[in-house]
Amino acid sequence: VQLQAFGGGLVQAGGSLRLSCAASGRTFSNYFMGWFRQAPGQERGAIAAITRGGGSTYYTDSVKDRFTISRDNAKNTVYLQMNSLKPEDMAVYYCAASPGGLDSYSYYHDYKYAYWGQGTKVTVSS
């Protein structure tokens, strides 16, 4: 499956952005989807994930209650709504797809994802 992430940009602290990740090539609903981010000088890490049908979502503590992951399988798209953005949220954001049925214990392992989008940059000004 091919993934293309978009929606990044410059936003002031406290503002909002919605990232989208469009999938093509294979049946999108067969994939567990995750969002990762990588800040300058830091390792890439998972921040949110969603099961194939969208029934379960997972978040790291750093974004919980501020970010919302969702998906529209009819549109082959996964979203990340980011509210109350902070300067520390500034990073390149990546979407990723896993053919496996991940859960709260495994979604943050990047090696479990077989497909990756190209990344979209989010800049948060203070």
Image (cartoon, rainbow, N blue to C red):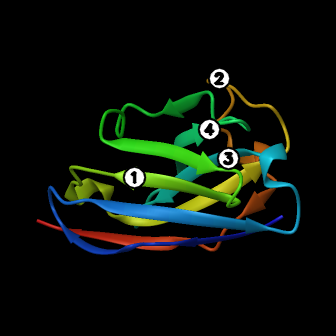
Dot placed on the residue nearer the N-terminal end, 1 or 2:
1
Q: Nearer the viewer, residue 56 or 72?
A: 72
The residue labelled by disc 4 is 50
Question: Of the numbered discs in the image, which one, if any, rests on residue 122?
Answer: none
Cα separation between marks 2 and 4: 13 Å
Amino acid type of the residue tagged 2 in the rendering: Tyr
Cα separation between marks 1 and 4: 13 Å
Dot placed on the residue nearer the N-terminal end, 1 or 4:
4
The spot of residue 118 in percent (x, y) is 63, 74
Residue sticking out furthest to the left: 126
Amino acid type of the residue tagged 3 in the rendering: Met
Amino acid type of the residue tagged 4 in the rendering: Ile
The spot of residue 113 in percent (x, y) is 76, 49
Q: Are marks 4 and 3 in contact (CB under 8 Å)?
A: yes
Q: Which secondary structure lies at badge 2?
A: loop
The residue labelled by disc 2 is 105
Q: Are marks 3 and 1 in contact (CB under 8 Å)?
A: no
- The reply, left or right, for residue 16 in relation to residue 72 is left
